[in-house]
Image (cartoon, coloured by chain):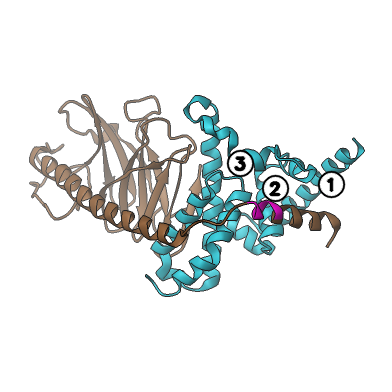
Amino acid sequence: MQPGFEELFHQQFEPMKRLAFLLGADDAENIAQEAFLRLHRRWPGLREPDKALAYLHRTVVNLAKSRLRHLRVVRRAPREEPGLADSAEVHVLTGLVGGSVRAALAQLTERQRQVLVLRYWLGLDQAAIGGALGIAVGTVKATNSQALDRLRTLLTTEEVR
Amino acid sequence: MNDLETLLRKEFDEQARSVPDSAEPWRALQRRLARRRALLVGAAAAVLLVAVAIVVPLTRHQTPITPATAAPTKPSPTTVAPVFDHNHPVLLAEGGRDKAWAFMVGDRVICVAMTKGSAAVDPQKADCAPDAANDSSGPSPVRTRAIGPEDGPFGHFLLFVADEGVHDLSVRSGDGTAVTLRLLGTTRQRQFWVADFGGSHQGFGYDGIDAKGNHFSAIT
């Protein structure tokens, strides 16, 4: 095994799996494994910890996005995969598990949720979020601000009820 | 930090904590790596077989478009498609009597042509367009070309033209499924790959590493 890779794996596997889960993927473990598999292939050019971590974030975000897109297609033909009713994505995105914050998060756009998870769970700065999502820092700022405004509105409405 | 931000951190932490730790993920990765290596060996063998399967018929049966001026074709079993002009078009796809070909005019223009049965490629009827490789304004290290109209016999294929040095190119369809790429050939500046989506290629995506080692990806 390539030096440094195993250490990074043990440090980051669980966080990457949880990141995939928070982004709505129903196969978070598979996504984290696939991300490390891809990192392993590109390890010679990504030895620096910052680069490797940024690559992992980007890959997990992209894989989770692909998975969500796949789930949306599958959901149009529900007979093909009836088990989806219990998926993590359903819990995260529709807020069926409970909690007004979770329910409010479910009403945000996919991009807004991505920005919030990367910012407030992973603690990335705006430049790193832009890198992970492939968008400009200005867009990150605007999306973050819009997402917080929307959440405030949704939570206030919830409280009034 | 305001209350909402604190609330968000708490909510995400709670959700993340609800995910149980995996049992022996490192071993699972080792198994995947071993499987991937076995697949790569198999794929390399398959690419070699496909290359031979393409080159041998082409070099044996190709009819020159301008017999009076065309140079005789010499078989070249060790390369996929070293010559890539209208006298030596590369077969992109075949279905029934329909065939799709690609060739280059000069070192910049890429043409896609259709034929029926054993008819030769007619460069006048080919769909030709300049390619942006090695152009400083080029938007991407990979460009794609449709092969005829979307409702045509090859509407589910796409031609991928990658800059020299691009590697680890992978393509997925709109639903996230991996799409198999077939290497058609390489020129001094480009690699030519064909992807069969088996259906619509709407919303396809791709990623890879460019010649400078930078990762690139795109979703259409």
Which chain did the image draw in brown?
Answer: B
Give the quarter of the figure containing the N terminus of chain A: bottom left
What is the x, y in percent for residue A61?
56, 52
* Quadrant including the C terminus of chain A: top right
- Label 2 resides on the chain identified as A
Between label 1 and label 3, give the one nearer the viewer: 3
Q: Residue at x 55, y 47 (%)?
A: A64
B27 above or below A71? below
Please name the residue that numbered disc 2 is placed on: A112
**Chain letter, cyan:** A
- Nearest to viewer (mark 3 / mark 2): 3
Residue B15 is covered by the magenta coloring = yes
Mark yes or no: residue B139 visible.
no
Q: Main secondary structure of the magenta part?
A: helix
Q: Does A33 sit left or right of B106 as displayed?
A: right
Q: Which residues are magenta?
A: B14-18
Q: Nearer the viewer, mark 2 or mark 1?
A: 1
Q: Which residue bears the numbered disc 3? A: A89
Percent position (x, y) of residue B164? 33, 59
Left or right placement of residue A30 versus residue B93 in this view: right
Residue at (38% x, 46% y) in the render: B130
Label 1: how many Cα within 10 Å (few below 14, some 14–19, many 20+): some
Amino acid at pointer 1? Arg
Secondary structure of the residue carrying tag 2 is helix
Q: Which residue, as the protein is rendered here, is positioned at the far right? A: A160
Residue under label 1, please give it. Answer: A152
Q: Are marks 3 and 2 on the same chain?
A: yes
